[in-house]
Amino acid sequence: MKLYYSKGACSLSPHIVALEAGLAVELVSVDLRTGTTFDGTDFKKVNPKGYVPTLVLDNGETLTEGPAIVQYLADQVPNKALIPGHGSLARYRAIEWLNFISTELHKSFGPLFTPQAPEASKVAAKENLGKRLDYVNQELNGKEYLLGSQFSVADAYLFTVLSWTPHFQIDLSSRANVAAFMERVRIRPAVQAALRAEGLTSGGNN
């Protein structure tokens, strides 16, 4: 399999999941500014959407969208328990978190990553993120990870998105449960390996 990624972007999430699962994936770097891969290939020929992550399977099929990719990767190695089993309520809890992270956290960073966005929209985005982070902090109370004591694909995604906060002066230290979660995930061997592979030391940027 080939995982198309951009340094520190949301593609860090499936990169972490692949390493946690022990799956062999070939990393292909994409320059999102030029829309080309490291060797000059037009990335839109791989993914017409033009953004990462993109996973090309061994049979040549292409899978896009981070939440879908991490579920696929986790299901390849069910014994790793990176996502609960099909049909279980816990599975739907994981999907619930993936959707929340995607629509309420990840999407909210959009104005912050857009230089031409009006300042008012950036202020509103930070306020919205603050409210959502308060909710996450509450939900992590008494838990190691989002689903309890077991690390899951949702944790990889949350870690990835929240690793962008330092770049926008969003302080996590006042949210003790979130701050502890970030450190807990950061020191996992697979996460450390993913950060090293992408040339990151303490997080990423979109």
Image (spheres, helix red, strand yellow):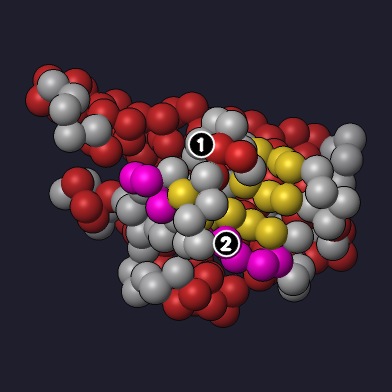
From the viewer's perspective, is 118 left or right of 129? left
Q: Secondary structure at mark 1?
A: loop
**Residue 67 falls in image quadrant:** top right
Near mark 2 (Cα within 10 A), the count class, few <14, some 14-19 or many ≥20, is: some
Residue 88 placed where, x, y %? 85, 38
Which residue occupies 54% across, 45% down? 43
Quarter in which the N terminus is drawn = bottom right
* 188 up-or-down from 122: above or below: below
Residue tagged 1: 50
Near mark 1 (Cα within 10 A), the count class, few <14, some 14-19 or many ≥20, is: some
Kindly identify which numbered label has been placed on residue 159: none
Q: Main secondary structure of the magenta part?
A: strand
Residue tagged 2: 28
Which residue occupies 52% across, 45% down? 42
From the viewer's perspective, is 110 left or right of 197? left
User: Can residue 141 be seen in the rendering of this structure?
Assistant: no
Q: Which stretch did the figure color magenta?
A: 25-34
Give me the C-alpha separation between circle 1 and circle 2.
Answer: 14 Å
* 181 up-or-down from 34: above or below: below
Q: Secondary structure at mark 2?
A: strand
Q: Is residue 29 magenta?
A: yes
Which residue occupies 87% across, 51% down? 59
Name of the residue lying farthest toward the left:
119
